[in-house]
Amino acid sequence: MPLVNAKEMLTKAKEGHYAVGQFNINNLEWTKSILLTAQEMNSPVILGVSEGAGKYMCGYKTVVGMVNGMLEELKITVPVALHLDHGSYEGAKACIAAGFSSVMFDGSHYPIDENIEKTKELVAICNEKGLSIEAEVGSIGGEEDGVVGAGECADPNECKMIADLGVTMLAAGIGNIHGKYPANWAGLSFETLAAVQEKTGTMPLVLHGGTGIPADMIKKAISLGVSKINVNTECQLAFQEATRKYIEEGKDLQGKGFDPRKLLAPGAEAIKACVREKIELFGSANKA
Ligand SMILES: [Zn+2]
């Protein structure tokens, strides 16, 4: 099945009270692991690509070529969206031209008027081309230069202003953070989430920074209107741990253990296990 935009899968998720996972990709192994697991679990899936990962994978055209090739060769029949994660205005335009089926424009660092102006322009382009688009209000915290941000809470009125532009999905900061959560993290602000949901009605909401949020908070967030959850760091940690174990056990030194297809296999399996666990938690299994 060719790439689809994320609109239908998220509308269904919102109605069915579950969430679709966005799993970020970094290379061929990542992509293959995520696609095979989504297919095995009969779940819709969103492949996320940050601008940095896009550059690393030799540009958006390479990513589109790789993903489209895999959909065909692996005989993937579940709905798959290829989505730019935290895109700039220029990045979003480049991904639209390269053949992505969905983009995020993160204008949260602009004053709200400028965020609205740029989002509006991109919504028009995406509508014309049949792509889905995610916008963001209230920046999402994270570690930068060793300083851990608390995770901002979005203004529900600003969320409504952006939602009314016709975006497909909306990321609103509710105290969530990218990367690992600090020990003193205050938790998600369900108060903010409920207020945003009330203002934005049927708009699917997106929870970024899904790594390390306790399962009960994830479930509560879904019950309050979150229909898409982004997972990135958790797969990286799973890959790292499995790869470290392989090397530490000296398996790369035994026989043909140096073969990259063997060396990267435990990490790829660990990503599968991570994706499987998330699809179960988010409730999207058998919802393809
Ligand atoms: Zn994010």
Image (cartoon, helix red, strand yellow):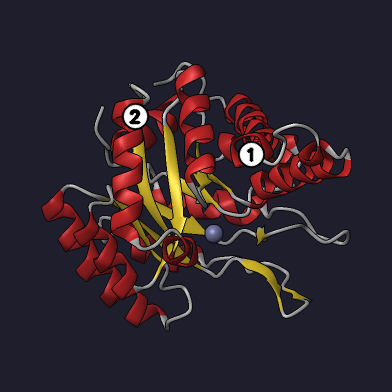
- Which amino acid is tagged 2? Pro
* Whether residue 225 is visible: no
x then y, percent, for residue 95 = 28, 60
Judged from the image, the secondary structure of the residue bearing numbered disc 2 is loop
Judged from the image, the secondary structure of the residue bearing numbered disc 1 is loop
User: What residue would you read off at disc 2?
Assistant: 79
Residue nearest the viewer, comparing 176 with 113: 176
Task: Specify the label residue 131 is tagged with.
Answer: none
- Residue 185 horizontal side relative to residue 149, left or right: right
x then y, percent, for residue 285 = 52, 20
Tell me whether the residue at label 2 lies in contact with that at label 1, contact meaning CB atoms closer than 8 angstroms: no
Looking at the image, which residue is at 47% across and 44% down?
28
- Residue 109 horizontal side relative to residue 247, left or right: left
User: What residue would you read off at disc 1?
Assistant: 259
x then y, percent, for residue 197 = 48, 48
Q: Quadrant of ligand 1?
A: bottom right
